[in-house]
Image (cartoon, coloured by chain):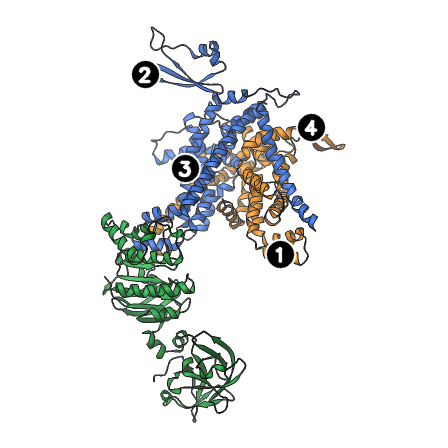
Chain colours: A green, B blue, C orange
Amino acid sequence: MPASVELRNVRKSYGAAEIIKGVSLRVAPGEFVVLVGPSGCGKSTLLRMIAGLEAISAGELRFDDVVVNDWDPARRRVGMVFQSYALYPHMTVEQNVGFALKLAKIPATERAARVDSALGVLQLTQLRHHKPSQLSGGQRQRVAIGRAIVRNPNVFLFDEPLSNLDATLRGQMRMEIARLHQRLMNTVIYVTHDQVEAMTLADRIVVLEDGVVRQIGTPMELYDAPANLFVASFIGTPTMGLFDARVTAQGLAIGTGDTETVRLPAHCAAVPAGTDLTLGIRPEHCTVSPVEGASLRGTIVMLERLGADTFAFLEVPGARDLVPVRLSAQTDGVVTGQKVGLEFDVGKAHVFDQTGMALPR
Amino acid sequence: MNRDRRITPLVFGAPALIGLAVFLVLPFLMALVLTFTDQRLVSPQPGAFVGLRNYQRLLSVGALVQSPERDRDTAYVRVRAVTRSDPAWRGYRPLGDFRIGARRVTILAKDPPFLRALGNTFAFAMMVVPLQCALALGLALLVNAGIRGETVFRAIYFSPVVMSMVIVSVVWAFLFDRDLGLLNQTLGAISFGVVRPVDWLGNPATAMPAIAIMSAWQGAGFQMLILLAGLQGISQELYDAARIDGASVWQRFVHITLPGLRQTIVFVLIVTTIAALGLFTQVDVMTGGGPRGATATVMFEAVRHGVREGDIAYGATISVVYFALITGLIVLQQWLMRSRARVAG
Amino acid sequence: MTPAAYKSIPLRLALYALMAVFGVVFLLPFLFMLSSSLKTNDGIFADFASIRAVLPVGALTGENYLHAFARGNIGHYLANSLLITGVTVLMGMVVNSLAAFALARLEWRGKQTALTLLVIALVVPFEAISVPLMILVAKLPGVALGADGLTMTRSWLDTLYVQIVPFVANAFSIFLFYQFFRDIPKDFDEAAYIDGATPLQVYRHVIVPSSLPVFATVAILQSLTMWNQYLWPLITVPGEAARPLMIGMEQFFGARKTAWGEVMAYASLITVPVLIAFIVLQRWFVRSVVGSGVKG
């Protein structure tokens, strides 16, 4: 039965070092929540605390409103898929999937039925007598999922399950996981460092940095309305282009020294002149234009042709890094080294204050 | 350059390969030839060819079944009378006897001390191998449990290994002393005097077990390190997955630790067994093969005959038989490890 | 196993206690040896029935050590053992690593045969050929340094070099070197050859500098083996001149079985330096053992 999962101000310390600094989160039954963030942000630790593999230093963890802090993993009835699958090497696929049931002393007939059902769902029936060493990466992962499914767990936990697969396989397995979720309607907490996986799989995403939650929201909420610079830079490929800016009487001055000025975005209206800000704009909201009369000017340093899309990376004075611009059919004829103008839709711009927080629209 | 390329490897490898050939292969071949002669160590004459006589003397074993004398059921013809008169039993001496019903079966051999030594050697191996390997596994599990200070404990458990077996034998000879030895003192203290002092090295029944206990003490640390390395090679994630699946500590040990250690354990068992079969130093230092041949081993007999008594042909024979025994064990190990490897994929 | 941090306090205490008990069992013989070496025979007999047997208490004296030196000729045997061990290990490192280099890095006819022979040589335990080897060296013409210079002798027995030469070439050392060399990327060799190096130079400048761990491992394992040799010197060195330390110990023990204190002093003199070396080089020891076992 899918359960709700709630974390209330959960903290984790190893000795003097605090790894998880007060995380609160509520996952509804059947919801697919993805924990995402850079290496070292604590997402795996958080997952292991939910699983019961690590102790919770402070705060509460609840399954269906029952505090489970002190419950050991088996009692919590969680299913976990590890990054390296952790399949028992000396057992066959069938035995791997049925192991937990055997430990729980489920009678053999019921055990066989549940194992058969899990194998069927994952199309592993043909491979039931194989050992893990004889399987491919994708097959092993399915066995790992099968082992989790067969116990009808409260919560499914995935710890970076696709990291060990090549790009094509990753895409396929992503879809299988999504389809499986639609079919089983289970509660899933999924950890990854890959924001593409997060965007495609999640009902809601939790962005973590250094043990702190930066934002929780649906994929599109995070994309369209990032709450801070970190989330804005983390979500979206290529990353958002960022400019150092200052509010002036004329508008928003981009860069320092010899600057250009653009129209002041609507949500900066109340900001006093002289304030330093960061301006962010997504590649699809930028266009390349002739140099004459453009708001900003830059040089094309790199072109990435991805087939359906082409991105130009511009060096622009006042920008923090190369600014990506999605090229349309009209502007596709540009070459590297070319000096171009940069236009963007001010209404779609994101503005962040000096602490990195986004100014609301 | 080309000529260089052909000669260089030979030049590099020559000292070692010649060394191995002269000091490993040659003695063995020489020994093989020697076993068919009656050469002695300090004899000016070369040995005469005697065929398989040395092997016969070493390995001949037979059983003499006797029924009681007609009128007296408890008396049998004296064995010595049989061996003196019956040409088939020439040169045989009794090794031991037992009764089946009314009949007496006497085991006779041409070299009873050797067969006894062979039995002692196997007995020793059967005592020391489980003891030492179980101890090593236990220590490895303890050290691996992640308690702080494990490096110190690991060093303590390993320290006997760096001590020479001669030193260990000398010190333990005192520990085993019947009247003053620490072992008897401790046993007496723990049992409040119930356990009487044991003459460990003087009693044929306890001499070999005593040596086994001491040898296990000395060697466990070595195997412990090897098992420890094997333990650390088992992925932590397997244990996590088992915890999630609901396995208890014991179940995790049985289903994860033991299978993961299988290759290592087989290796440790075989290595310990081969070393056990070569038992010599402890016996030579502590008991000299006694009491009454209870601690003589194959190697001890080889040195006794070949060196101390100068019968090098016979000593070589024992060495060859010993070599065959070890080779058989190695083949067994290879077969075991290979079939495991096939299963593991 | 699960990291310690996850275990409850009582469980941790229980494990600690267990480890301590084993620790005591393993240390007891050492303590007995050291304590007894500092007591007179009367002291030892007085203390034997209690915990005092393993503690250096009571009237302590250093006379056992003096007697051991005087009566036991330790200095001479120690020098012999040092010489034997040092020369064998040093020569062995050169000879065996060169052979392993030839096997691992060079192509030559007969390499496969040599490798097979190496594997066979690995499994032969020394005891099996010790007596035949003794017979061989007993008949080999040798040399002796005497008053009139170098003279020929009829056999190798009763010399220092009979304890050295047969052990320089060592199959296990070659094996360890071979396994290690195989893991060094061939790119380094090839770069050196392109720069015009000869195989010997590749050995000296590429392989050896990258192989310090295995040299340490081989040095430690071989040193231990040579230092603790007993069977071989027993059967090949009856005399005193070339006698090594272990035989000296056994002789001393046999001759003065009732002089407990002195025997323990002799034993301590031999053991304590090795123990100190072990404590200092502990990590290397562990690595050596693991390296030799894991590859098995």
Left or right, A21 with respect to C215, comes to: left
Q: Secondary structure at mark 4?
A: loop
User: Closest to the observer: C84 or C261?
Assistant: C84
Q: Which mark is residue B131?
A: 3
Q: Chain of mark 2?
A: B
User: Closest to the observer: B308 or C27?
Assistant: B308
Q: Given contact means CB atoms under 8 Å apart, are the residues at marks 2 and 4 in contact?
A: no
Disc 3 from disc 1: Cα separation: 50 Å
Number of the front mark, 2 or 4: 2
Task: Please state which amino acid type lies under the numbered disc 1.
Answer: Glu
Q: Position of residue C233 (x, y in %)?
A: 59, 33
Mark 3 and mark 2 lie on one chain; the one further toward the N terminus is 2
Q: Chain of mark 4?
A: C
Q: Which mark is residue B101?
A: 2
Q: Secondary structure at mark 3?
A: helix
Q: Position of residue B69 (x, y in %)?
A: 36, 8
Q: Position of residue A90 (x, y in %)?
A: 37, 48
Q: Quadrant of residue C145?
A: top right
Number of the front mark, 1 or 4: 1
Mark 4, other Cα within 10 Å: few <14 / some 14–19 / many ≥20: few
Mark 3, other Cα within 10 Å: few <14 / some 14–19 / many ≥20: some
User: Closest to the observer: A264 or B219?
Assistant: A264
Image position of A113 with respect to B131: above or below: below
The residue that appears at 27% across and 53% down in the rendered structure is A116
Q: Is residue A94 visible?
A: yes
What residue does disc 4 label?
Answer: C154
What residue does disc 1 label?
Answer: C190
